[in-house]
Amino acid sequence: MRVMVNGVEIELVRGDITAESSDAIVNAANSALAGGGGVDHAIHRAGGDAIMRECARFGGCPTGSAVITTGGELKARYVIHTVGPIYVDGQRGEPQLLASAYASSLRLALDNGIKTISFPSISTGVYGYPIGFAARIALETVFDFVMANKGLRSVRFVLFSERDLAVYSKALERLAKGG
Ligand code: ADP
């Protein structure tokens, strides 16, 4: 599924983000930037050691922020590592922190001349964020960002399962209708 917002293509696909050929892919990292499971593991495995060497220089990344490294051996030139919140009950700033993780990644992309960027579904794996809520926040944040900022050409969400893709598709349909 694909929509245009202020001249920017926003697209949902099912797939493995490590295979993306966008300028940057986003990693759902932890605040130590130490590597981990899930998509983080897949990105470091596919991109090679250069990514971890650059991560180590930052000495971590607070929840809701982002840092940028080489894409190493990936097709993508850059990896933007962002740290989403661990979901507790939704009352501990999780929505704001999740929105901030997306917005910080998009800002960093613009600042580095990146035109095309691919996101995974941040925080909805081990960090436990309910995907229906997370999808809405993710898409709303991207809509708001591209309405306010020129420079990006395409923002893709690369969802790992058909179910995740279905949830994001429903959220995007609602949002595109203004709901
Ligand atoms: P978090 O700790 O932020 O929850 P996870 O890596 O545990 O991060 O999960 C985030 C999402 O990434 C989950 O929906 C998971 O299914 C998905 N995922 C895992 N591997 C990949 C991959 N190679 N490409 C795209 N998405 C992936």
Image (cartoon, rainbow, N blue to C red):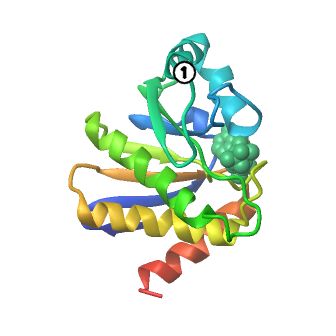
Residue shown at 56% from the left, 71% from the top: 136
* Residue 22 percent across, percent down from the top left: 42, 38
Closest to the observer, 168 or 31: 31
* Residue 51 percent across, percent down from the top left: 55, 18
Q: Secondary structure at mark 1?
A: helix
Q: Is residue 1 visible?
A: no
Left or right, 132 with reference to 173: right
Q: Quadrant of residue 103?
A: bottom left
Residue shown at 64% from the left, 23% from the top: 44
Q: Quadrant of residue 13?
A: bottom right
177, above or below 26, in the image: below
102, above or below 69, in the image: below
Q: Quadrant of residue 53?
A: top right
Which amino acid type corresponds to the residue marked 1 in the rendered image? Cys
The quadrant of the rendered image in which ligand 1 is seen is top right
Left or right, 52 with reference to 108: right
Closest to the observer, 171 or 123: 123
* Residue 124 percent across, percent down from the top left: 71, 56
Left or right, 124 with reference to 106: right
In the image as oriented, which residue stretches furthest toward the front? Answer: 92
Q: Residue at label 1?
A: 55
* Residue 130 percent across, percent down from the top left: 73, 66
Left or right, 42 with reference to 100: right
Q: Residues within 10 Å of mark 1 (few under 14, many from 20)?
A: many
Residue shown at 51% from the left, 50% from the top: 101
